[in-house]
Amino acid sequence: MSIRFAAAHSRPISDVVFAPVAGSVPRPANDHDPLPPRNWFSPRERVLREALRHFASYGMAAAACARDNARAAYLRGETANCTRWLEICRTLDRRMAEAANVEFAGEA
């Protein structure tokens, strides 16, 4: 018999039957208080949280999308918004953000 062989359960009753009753389940040990207010996080943590949310929405195209958003903000003259999107892009892909920064500096 191989070491990796795992025999099937031979009990005729499902494990679900042995699960505790719904009312007797204790609260999880990691049931923490809600997150602190947004201004509690440091600026770097805020950018990281925004970048992770952006990545969750756009997947592997998140850095390119953030760069395009920075470019659109730059063309509209919104420097604060452009900087924010470049920081999100830098968090996801440093080289892409640096190339975009050089591109924006060349257009100025």
Image (cartoon, helix red, strand yellow):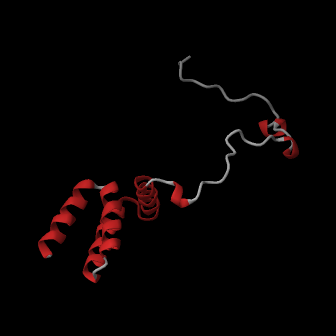
Instruction: Count numbered badges in the picture.
Output: 0
Looking at the image, is 100 positioned above or below residue 21?
below
| Residue at the image point whose x is 79% and y is 37% from the top | 14
Q: Residue 7, image x and y in percent?
A: 65, 25
The quarter of the rendered structure image containing the N terminus is top right
Q: Is residue 95 left or right of residue 56?
A: left
Q: Residue 38, image x and y in percent?
A: 53, 60
Q: Residue 45, image x and y in percent?
A: 44, 53
Question: Residue pushed farthest left?
Answer: 106
Question: Residue pushed farthest bottom?
Answer: 76
Looking at the image, is 69 positioned above or below residue 39?
below
- In the image, 44 versus 102, the foreground residue is 44
Q: Residue 60, image x and y in percent?
A: 36, 59
| Residue at the image point whose x is 35% and y is 61% from the top | 88
- In the image, 99 versus 105, the foreground residue is 105
Q: Is residue 39 left or right of residue 102?
A: right
| Residue at the image point whose x is 41% and y is 64% from the top | 58
- In the image, 19 versus 32, the foreground residue is 32
The quarter of the rendered structure image containing the C terminus is bottom left
Residue 24 sits in quarter? top right
Q: Is residue 36 left or right of residue 72?
A: right
| Residue at the image point whose x is 15% and y is 69% from the top | 105
